[in-house]
């Protein structure tokens, strides 16, 4: 597609120490506790705080959670508008390091974004309800909060998200310029028809120059037939 990173590629598997430092910072703030609940123990949100005051002695320690508080976190999403969550009531204390030893997505995303001086996050709306958790971690770790823009996701006629994890059909890469053109149409960027046949670099240059947030569909989902 002619899309390349601006800088060297960074691998999360090589940044364990950075995530560990962030975890220790949260531990010093007395925000971390061990949790021995299994998925089976926790049928619904929010996490009921079962292990906040210590795990049951006969249970093996499973994961680490961060304590949430009763403050409302408000996001001004560049496309979706205002979105807010009370973490304590809607999510509960959430996992920061999994039982298998992996750091949770929210922690690594926050550390990576800050380390790479990311100022603008543009991603699918399926991550909008995770954003307050990330902002909470940024606040606790003294890291800046980027601006967020959550795009609608493509769904099929049955309301199922079109994604590779759900075995959507693969993109035919024979004509990448057509695919880029279609993506711009999907995002209602109104590309002129003649650029459809241009090479990918020229289409990308047009897209960078003409990208307009105000043209984006203010929706959560777009049905693809
Ligand atoms: Zn627990």
Image (cartoon, helix red, strand yellow):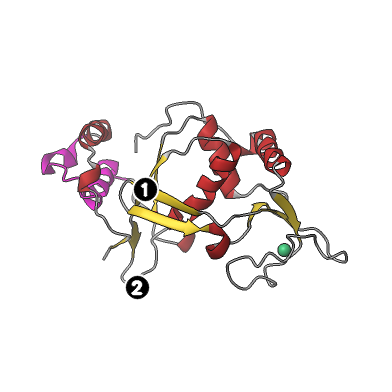
Quadrant showing the N terminus: top left
Number of the label disc, if any, that sits on residue 76: 1
Regarding mark 1 in the picture, which secondary structure is present there? strand
Q: Residue furthest top?
A: 7
Q: Is residue 166 above or below residue 41?
A: above
* Rendering quadrant holding ligand 1: bottom right
Quadrant showing the C terminus: bottom left
Q: Earlier in the sequence, mark 2 or mark 1?
A: 1
Nearer to us in this view, 40 or 47: 47
The part of the chain drawn in magenta is 174-198
The residue carrying pointer 2 sits among few (fewer than 14), some (14 to 19) or many (20 or more) residues within 10 Å by Cα, namely few
Nearer to us in this view, 197 or 140: 140
Residue at 41 percent across and 61 percent down: it is 168
Tell whether position 193 is magenta: yes
Q: Quadrant of residue 158?
A: bottom left
Tell whether position 178 is magenta: yes
The residues tagged by marks 2 and 1 sit, at their Cα atoms, a distance apart of 30 Å
The residue carrying pointer 1 sits among few (fewer than 14), some (14 to 19) or many (20 or more) residues within 10 Å by Cα, namely few
Would you say the magenta stretch is mainly helix, strand or loop? helix
Residue 177 coordinates in the image, percent (x, y):
25, 41
Give the labeled residue for mark 2: 158
């Amino acid at each position: 597609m002619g899309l390349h990173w601006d800088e060297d590629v960074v691998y999360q598997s090589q940044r364990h120490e950075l995530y560990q430092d962030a975890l220790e910072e949260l531990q010093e703030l007395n925000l971390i506790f061990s949790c021995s609940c299994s998925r089976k123990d926790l049928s619904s949100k929010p996490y009921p705080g079962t292990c906040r005051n210590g795990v049951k002695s006969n249970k093996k320690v499973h994961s680490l959670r961060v304590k949430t508080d009763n403050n409302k976190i408000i996001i001004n999403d560049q496309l979706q508008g205002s979105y807010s969550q009370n973490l304590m009531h809607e999510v509960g204390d959430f996992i920061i390091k999994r039982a298998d030893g992996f750091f949770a997505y929210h922690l690594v995303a926050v550390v990576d974004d800050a380390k790479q001086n990311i100022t603008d996050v543009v991603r699918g709306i399926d991550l909008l309800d995770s954003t307050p958790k990330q902002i909470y971690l940024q606040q606790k770790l003294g890291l800046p909060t980027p601006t967020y823009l959550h795009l609608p996701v493509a769904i099929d006629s049955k309301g199922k998200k079109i994604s590779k994890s759900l075995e959507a059909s693969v993109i035919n890469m024979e004509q990448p310029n057509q695919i880029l053109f279609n993506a711009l149409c999907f995002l209602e960027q109104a590309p002129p028809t003649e650029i459809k046949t241009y090479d990918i670099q020229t289409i990308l240059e047009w897209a960078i120059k003409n990208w307009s947030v105000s043209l984006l569909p203010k929706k959560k989902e777009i049905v693809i037939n």
